Amino acid sequence: MSCSLRISPYLPISPPGRLNELLSKKKTELTRCALLALDEADRMLDLGFEPQIAAILGHMRHDRQSLLFSATWPAEVQTLAGRLIAPSHVIVEVGGALATSGRANTSIEQRVLLCDDAGKMEALLTLLEEVVDGSRLLLFTSSKRRCDELTKELRLDGWPALALHGDKPQEERDWVLQQFRSAEHPLLVATDVAQRGLDVKGVAAVINVDCPETSEAYVHRIGRTGRAGEVGRAYTLVTPADARMCDDLVQVLRDAKQEVPPELLRLAAEGRAARYKRYKYS
């Protein structure tokens, strides 16, 4: 990247950390840069990149134009963005994005499967026996280690699974995606690195092996299926440890006019009771 910057490119593209590193080493400068664009702005701000972005802005001219692109725009992220862009900003909404922000695609059939932690693997294998037919399936886990461990378990059991997460070399990630797109390996086990920006046609179903921590993450995960007018399916394995997320999950299901299992309602009530107890005695 340092070599490329020596020729003064018209449009450099970089993650915030790498760009800050180059700026601190005086490998480049942004005093003539008149445009800043942040893609997946909500995710970038939500993941704690605000200080790095603020540092980059300190190297730019004050009359710059700032563009933020996002599929969701929750209130807390709006507050953060307000510190980075001019008060006279303009919001452009495409296809009712703000009205449907945080809502799941109604073309996706959503099912919640309740199990305990010890029985989660058995529940997953039973589900795979039911849904695997050669079509592409995307499985989400909560961590990179969990992603690798689950992929290993599935492969040992004979399932054609590959892993995708941020610690994989770029060459391996490209190969894994090629194998998934061609359906040579139709089971892709991934972390949330794949919940946004992964556009693979014909993903038949998404399986949340580990429940996501926010409703936004849930909506983005299951949004990898049911794209471009197709019908999709989403399955989420929920354990008692996920009680804190159940209220949000119930709301997403109701907004999409999906069936809400009574066991999920019970778990959501337990989660509310636990939060109230913590609040009362804190």
Image (tube, rainbow, N blue to C red):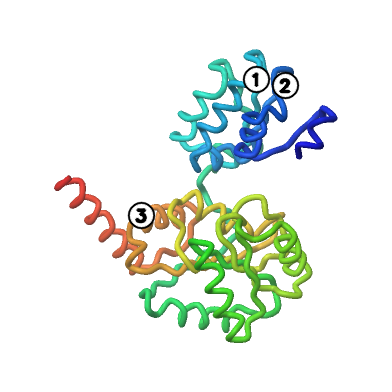
Rendered image quadrant of residue 238? bottom left
Taking 147 as reference, is 6 left or right?
Answer: right
Which quadrant holds the N terminus?
top right
Q: Position of residue 25 (x, y in %)?
A: 65, 31
Which badge, 1 or 2, is on the more N-terminal residue? Answer: 2
Which badge, 3 or 2, is on the more N-terminal residue? Answer: 2
* C-alpha span from label 3 to label 2: 45 Å
- Depth check: 253 or 234 in front? 234
Residue 6: mark in rendering: none
Q: List the single residue furthest toward the bottom.
A: 157
Q: Which residue is mark 1?
A: 60
Which badge, 1 or 3, is on the more N-terminal residue? Answer: 1
Q: State whether residue 157 is above or below residue 38.
A: below
Q: Position of residue 243 (x, y in %)?
A: 33, 61
Q: List the single residue furthest toward the top.
A: 63
* C-alpha span from label 1 to label 3: 43 Å
Circle 2 packing at 10 Å, graded few (<14), some (14-19), many (20+), is: some
